[in-house]
């Protein structure tokens, strides 16, 4: 039996532009025996403005910083106490997720002799993996889908006090092709233990430079490890793929927070928390070839799904059915578009993979390649409100009003959300 933290394979991201490469991005994605540990993401904050705060009583004279070192020490100590208090408050709402996975390997390529291996038959292989989860109700946990991948045979969770609860099931998970890397777990028997839900914040209010703290199951063996940093950026879109360069495993992840996290394996699915102790993100990826570049899913992008699962106990993803590019000034200039914010349904170069999926709610509503969706129900799509996030605030069957720019003219389109495909 193999051990893996975070259940998965390491993904990398490369990018064009002047022939350069983007830092590789490791994404925990589970269930493949050939990779020992999955990555990801814990996220961050820290070195909090404490040091900067220590300078409040100092001033710059001729380029030399002067001030009272004692006052600086007090402020830094205060920040440390704040992080410690956040860890104590949020820590009980963070669990380690322990997973057993059955995968298959081709015994003919593994050097084994005898038996069916000579004929190249696939044989089952047991693996163990570990990640992190966030308690969102007294018996429900949210984590990343790559923490509990296809092939998961059993799940248990370890509470912050070391108690292991073994009767845990997977309520549902997004498909591997979905840009939202999310899964939900249900603790069927708490054995009398209380599972305190985390307090969820509003990720739309997050600003670059905000201090954040992350808690997770580092390396799959160090529970409730705490790291700190800041929000380095938001609205990030990455293509994560296997580090081997196999494009078939690539995944598009959109609308992510970027943090200066010290990322550790096993932290996938853990919380990114603001200084009020509110969860504003779910850690999911890291840049492996760079220092302190990590990525987290804004909690608002998951809020609708959380509300649905907590209310009904069931998981179904609302679905519009378009592939889109989040607009920025640079993207708008590249495509010569008249607006700089929105979701651009870019024409596809592959006829077998159109940007408006056949039979989807988007197709039924008459959306076309080249359209730009600029708002949903009056809320503008921008760097703090993504199309994905706004759709996920609704339920399957809801009607939504889409503001669309088509050939320079603004129109309104009504779409009825469907259920996202499971694979």
Image (tube, helix red, strand yellow):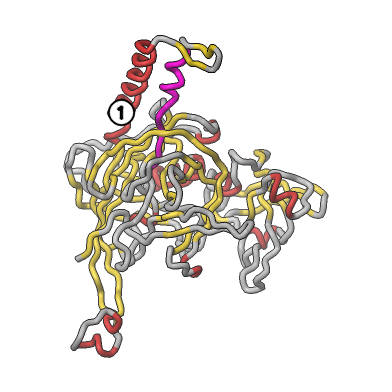
Percent coordinates x, y for residue 371 in the rendering = 73, 55
Q: Which residue is nearer to you in this view: 273 or 301?
A: 273
Percent coordinates x, y for residue 333 in the rendering = 75, 50
Q: Residue at x 68, y 69 (%)?
A: 349
Image quarter (top left, top right, bottom left or bottom right) of the N terminus? bottom left
Q: Which residue is nearer to you in this view: 374 or 138?
A: 374
Percent coordinates x, y for residue 245 in the rendering = 47, 67
Q: Residue at x 74, y 55 (%)?
A: 335
Mark 1 lies on residue: 89
Asked if residue 134 is positioned above or below residue 10 in the image, the reply reads above
Res 34 seen here? yes
Percent coordinates x, y for residue 420 in the rendering = 52, 59
Q: Which residue is nearer to you in this view: 18 or 356?
A: 18
In this rendering, position of residue 85 left or right of residue 297: left
In this rendering, position of residue 192 left or right of residue 43: left
Dominant SS of magenta comes to: loop
Is the residue marked by circle 1 packed among few (<14), some (14-19), or many (20+) residues within 10 Å?
some
Q: Residue at x 50, y 58 (%)?
A: 13
Magenta residues (range): 42-56
Residue 53: in magenta span:
yes
Indicate the quadrant where residue 274 lies: top left
Res 323 seen here? no
- Helix, strand or loop status at disc 1: helix
Q: Which residue is nearer to you in this view: 311 or 100?
A: 100
Q: Total marks drawn?
A: 1
In this rendering, position of residue 310 left or right of residue 375: left
């Amino acid at each position: 039996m193999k051990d893996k933290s975070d259940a998965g394979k390491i993904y990398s991201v490369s990018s064009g532009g002047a022939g350069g490469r983007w830092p590789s991005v490791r994404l925990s994605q589970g269930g493949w025996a050939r990779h020992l540990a999955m990555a990801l993401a814990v996220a961050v904050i820290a070195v909090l403005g404490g040091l900067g705060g220590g300078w409040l009583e100092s001033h710059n004279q001729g380029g030399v910083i002067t001030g009272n070192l004692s006052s600086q020490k007090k402020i830094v100590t205060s920040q440390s106490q704040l992080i410690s208090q956040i860890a104590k408050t949020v820590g009980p709402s963070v669990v380690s997720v322990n997973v057993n996975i059955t995968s298959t390997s081709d015994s003919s390529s593994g050097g084994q002799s005898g038996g069916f291996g000579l004929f190249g038959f696939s044989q089952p292989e047991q693996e163990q993996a570990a990640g992190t989860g966030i308690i969102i109700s007294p018996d429900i946990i949210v984590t990343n889908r790559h923490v509990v991948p296809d092939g998961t045979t059993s799940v248990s969770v370890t509470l912050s006090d070391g108690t292991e609860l073994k009767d845990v099931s997977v309520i549902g998970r997004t498909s591997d092709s979905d840009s939202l890397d999310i899964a939900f777990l249900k603790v069927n028997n708490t054995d009398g233990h209380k599972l305190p839900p985390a307090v969820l914040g509003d990720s739309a209010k997050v600003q670059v430079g905000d201090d954040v703290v992350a808690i997770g199951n580092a390396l799959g063996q160090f529970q409730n490890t705490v790291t700190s940093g800041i929000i380095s950026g938001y609205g990030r879109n990455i293509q994560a793929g296997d580090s081997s360069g196999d494009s078939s495993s690539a995944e598009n992840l959109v609308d992510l927070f970027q943090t200066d996290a010290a990322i550790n394996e096993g932290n996938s699915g853990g919380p990114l928390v603001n200084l009020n102790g509110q969860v504003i993100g779910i850690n999911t990826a890291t840049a492996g070839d760079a220092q302190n570049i990590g990525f987290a899913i804004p909690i608002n992008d998951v809020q609708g799904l959380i509300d649905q699962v907590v209310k009904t106990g069931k998981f179904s993803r609302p679905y519009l059915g378009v592939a889109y590019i989040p607009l920025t000034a640079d993207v708008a200039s590249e495509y010569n578009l008249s607006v700089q914010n929105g979701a651009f349904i870019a024409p596809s170069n592959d006829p077998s993979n159109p940007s408006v999926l056949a039979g989807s709610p988007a197709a039924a509503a008459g959306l076309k390649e080249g359209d730009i969706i600029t708002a949903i129900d009056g809320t503008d799509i921008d760097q703090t409100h993504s199309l994905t996030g706004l759709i996920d605030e609704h339920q399957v069957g809801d009607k939504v009003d889409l503001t669309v720019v088509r050939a320079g003219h603004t129109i309104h389109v009504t779409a009825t959300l469907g259920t996202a495909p499971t694979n």
